[in-house]
Image: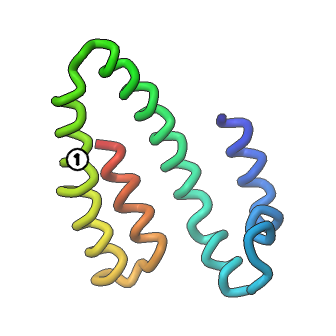
Amino acid sequence: MCIVMVCLSLNQDFVSSLFTSDAEDIKYIKEVLDLMFIYVLLDSIHGVNTGLVRALGKQFKASVATLCCYYLVGMPLAILFGFQFDMDVRGFWLAFTIGILL
């Protein structure tokens, strides 16, 4: 996973051009790509931990914690960062990265 993220990070122009040819969109993609790599790494760890919790039979507590992190922390932070602090798309990704980090 880390090797793929490093390769993609080193080739941000190529990755950005896979999705669009518009210069402004490419700028936004490159602006958010590093933060997305961190989010994907944390989300992968979260997926593994979710499987472990399910195997232990403690899904309810984990579900409540996940909902709280995403909807009570991540969503308000996304609105705050994205709109109030004018961080745009980067603010949304940062907020949900903070939410998944909890």
**How many residues crowd mark 1 within 10 Å: few (<14), some (14–19), many (20+)?**
few
Compared with 93, 39 (above or below) is above
**Of all residues shown, which one is farthest toward the top?**
56
Residue 48: x and y, percent?
45, 26
Residue 13 position by quadrant: bottom right
Residue 33: x and y, percent?
61, 61
The color scheme shown is rainbow
In the image, taking residue 59 as reference, residue 50 lies left or right, namely right
Q: Which residue is drawn at 17% across and 39% down?
A: 64
Residue 73 position by quadrant: bottom left
Compared with 80, 40 (above or below) is above
What amino acid type is highlighted by mark number 1?
Leu
Residue 77: x and y, percent?
27, 66
Compared with 29, 99 (above or below) is above
Q: Which residue is drawn at 30% across and 21% down?
A: 53
Which quarter of the rendered picture does the C terminus lie within?
top left
Determine the secondary structure under disc 1: helix
From the viewer's side, name the closer residue of 24 and 85. 24
Which quarter of the rendered picture does the N terminus lie within?
top right
In the image, taking residue 15 as reference, residue 41 lies left or right, namely left
In the image, taking residue 77 as reference, residue 2 lies left or right, namely right
Residue 78 position by quadrant: bottom left
Residue 76: x and y, percent?
22, 67
From the image, tell me which residue sits under label 1: 67
Q: Residue at x 28, y 83 (%)?
A: 84
Compared with 7, 16 (above or below) is below
From the viewer's side, name the closer residue of 65 and 98. 65
